[in-house]
Amino acid sequence: MAGPGGRSVTLHDALELAIVLVLVAVAVGVSLGFRLGLESQLAVAVVRALVQLAAVAAVINFVLEHPPFAALFIVVMAAAAALTSGHRLKGIPSAAGIALAAISIATALALGILFGLGVFDFVPRFLVPIAGMLIGNSMNATSVAGALLRDEIESKTLEIETRLALGVGVREALAVHVRKAVTTSLIPLIDSTKNVGLILLPGGFVGMLLGGASPAQAAQVQAIILFMLLGAVAVAGMVTVVLVARAYVATGERIVIPVR
């Protein structure tokens, strides 16, 4: 396994990891002391995290050494994200396809701007992790926006149909529900952006400091990451609600609830 800068993980590195696991033991102790019953879940979480991180480190190391596979890796990430989000959107026609479209459009737009305008060098070392962040955050926005709009339409069908019967267009009839879905999907990232440095120090900022970058450099990169994610999440949410709304609208501007 490779450590920072591509070096091999040493015995010292493994010892540091073992020391940090003391904190996990503290969590287990809390669970035992308060009879929370979380000991097995904590153990499984730690083991899974170690295995998954080791696996992804090996895969990314391979991709960095073989650049042509970077695009394939990004496609696999997008497909996995679409399947995950599609599961959250269960009940919506073509849920996985909607998720894939929203995630892909948002990610492609952000990557095109970042690399097309030279913000980052177009090399796998930058492309893969940035694409991963964009895909992951777009997936979350897609799941939240799509699921909320689905629930809004299905729980308030009569209200929406009443507006339609009064001559209101389907776009206007769904507008309040669409706005609610997109707004809700954006709130977590907006709050994180507003409070960055005050309430929390993001992982990217901390990681760069630990890697030896200056605070100014870390702040600059973190700002770029936050702003690119805001744009991508907004696009993902917008595309999602447009496609989900279409899935519930039939010919003649009628609302049709799919049979589950």
Image (cartoon, rainbow, N blue to C red):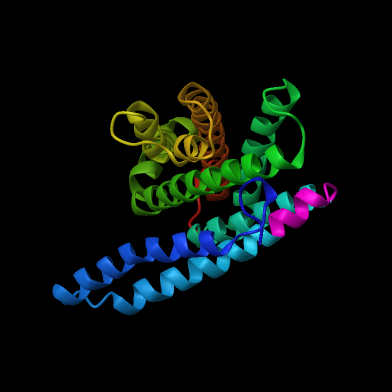
Foreground of the two, 30 or 77: 30
Residue 256 in percent (x, y) is at 50, 53
Residue 105 colored in magenta in the image? no
For the point 68% across and 37% down, which residue is it? 126
What is the span of residues highlighted in magenta in the rendered image?
Answer: 59-68
Foreground of the two, 189 or 89: 189
Foreground of the two, 21 or 142: 21
| Residue 83 visible in the current orientation | yes
Where 235 sits versus 25, above or below?
above
Where 182 sits versus 60, above or below?
above
For the point 71% across and 49% down, which residue is it? 74
For the point 58% across and 56% down, which residue is it? 95
Residue 45 in percent (x, y) is at 42, 70
Residue 125 in percent (x, y) is at 71, 41
**Left or right for 167, reference 129:** left
**Left or right for 125, reference 92:** right
For the point 53% across and 30% down, which residue is it? 213
The quarter holding residue 243 reads top right
Where 5 sits versus 112, above or below?
below
Where 107 sits versus 26, above or below?
above
Total residue callouts:
0
Residue 65 colored in magenta in the image? yes
| Residue 94 visible in the current orientation | no
The quarter holding residue 19 reads bottom left
**Left or right for 157, reference 128:** left
Image quarter (top left, top right, bottom left or bottom right) of the N terminus: bottom right
Foreground of the two, 36 or 172: 36
- Helix, strand or loop: magenta stretch: helix
Q: Which residue is at the far left? A: 34
Residue 93 in percent (x, y) is at 58, 57
Q: Which residue is at the far front? A: 12
